Amino acid sequence: MNKLSKKTEYALMALKLFSDIDLVSKGLKPHSDLHLNSNAPLQMTVSAQDIADRTHAPYEVIARVLQVLSSRGILKAEYGLFGGYQLAKNLNEVTVHELMDALESSTDLTKCLNSENDCDLSSKCTIVSPITQLNTKVQNFYKSISLQEVLHV
Amino acid sequence: MNKLSKKTEYALMALKLFSDIDLVSKGLKPHSDLHLNSNAPLQMTVSAQDIADRTHAPYEVIARVLQVLSSRGILKAEYGLFGGYQLAKNLNEVTVHELMDALESSTDLTKCLNSENDCDLSSKCTIVSPITQLNTKVQNFYKSISLQEVLHV
DNA sequence: CGATATCCGTCAAAATTTGTCGTATATTGC
DNA sequence: GCAATATACGACAAATTTTGACGGATATCG
Ligand code: FES
Ligand code: FES
């Protein structure tokens, strides 16, 4: 399959939103219009509902994604009225690998590489070493790309 | 998910087998024992059944994989008794991307990138450009790695 | 012609992803 | 204290994809 899950896509949308808001707060223009509703003052803290509305992602799903990003320290959560999420890290310091590790079922290239999945063929398997080495290359590749680099295009 | 499918794994096993046979034919030692059964002379042409036996992959599945590799010109097929498959290309000239393109459902990083899948959100989507650019990077990465490089470790 | 092996369409089982629901917990404003 | 709001989390159903199996057609060779 070799695809990024919807969860990771939704995460990128949310993080791009925060990234743009951050630009606005510094007096710079975002790359795409934010379509901020109402004339309320710009809130650095955005609720899951707002993020769902603006990204057009299903609320329940992206809410869960935001919780994970929060648990990973990429976002900071605030309870209560006017609560929501804020960027907690500079996106320059978060890699694509980190995002995948947070949201994908696994970052490994194959199921057999997963230590929990004890493949009964591993003793007879002829490509354990090749796959392992290729896997390392792929991991390093995704570790070499920051989210800033991805979103700020 | 971001994983290589079983089909691609089976393909790598088969190609490693051919790669090792090729070494033997040149009088060199393969990296892993071939466990050639019987005392028959070494055949450059190997049947799907033999490959299934030696890789421990389900016959029906790896047979289909071999057919695809044949249609892509990576293997050469021969009908009839003592028929089977041979390496048709130098593995130095076949990339990981080429193998994925042959066997994975898609080489694209997300479903939305697939032109057939006309995502109804694409007009509102905020990450079309970021995803597209990241996708290109990933494609180029997989195009930069040859199967020789992967299997000959 | 018969034995063997590649080819190919279809389909069911299994696994994974995606989305939904219900509920608990924490914070704020009154 | 209490109601309103928003995050946190477990469980579950629907949808999609992968994996594997079956049946039969086509090609080659002795
Ligand atoms: S380790 Fe599972 S098939 Fe190679
Ligand atoms: S293009 Fe489909 S969600 Fe972005």
Image (spheres, coloured by chain):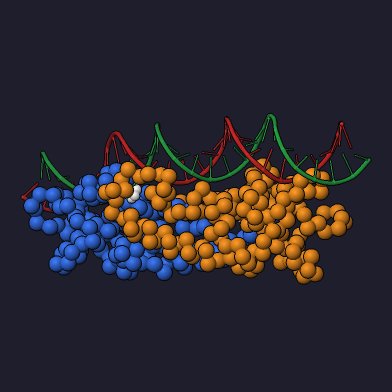
Chain colours: A orange, B blue, C green, D red
Locate residue B13 relative to residue A40 in the image: left or right: left
Percent position of residue A31, x then y: 71, 66
Quadrant where the C terminus of chain A sits is bottom right
Observer able to see residue A139: yes
Residue at point 41%, 69% (across, down) = B144
Percent position of residue C18, x then y: 58, 44
Locate residue C28 relative to residue B126 in the image: left or right: right
Locate residue B103 relative to residue A53 in the image: left or right: left
Percent position of residue A152, x then y: 65, 67
Q: Nearer the viewer, residue D1 or B119?
A: D1
Locate residue D3 relative to residue D7 in the image: left or right: right
Residue at point 77%, 54% (across, down) = A45
Quadrant of res B17: bottom left
Quadrant of res A89: bottom right
Residue at point 38%, 61% (across, down) = A133
Q: Nearer the viewer, residue B153 or C28?
A: C28
Observer able to see residue A13: no
Q: Nearer the viewer, residue A129 or B39?
A: A129
Percent position of residue A93, x then y: 61, 65
Number of labelled discs? 0
Residue at point 70%, 62% (across, down) = A19
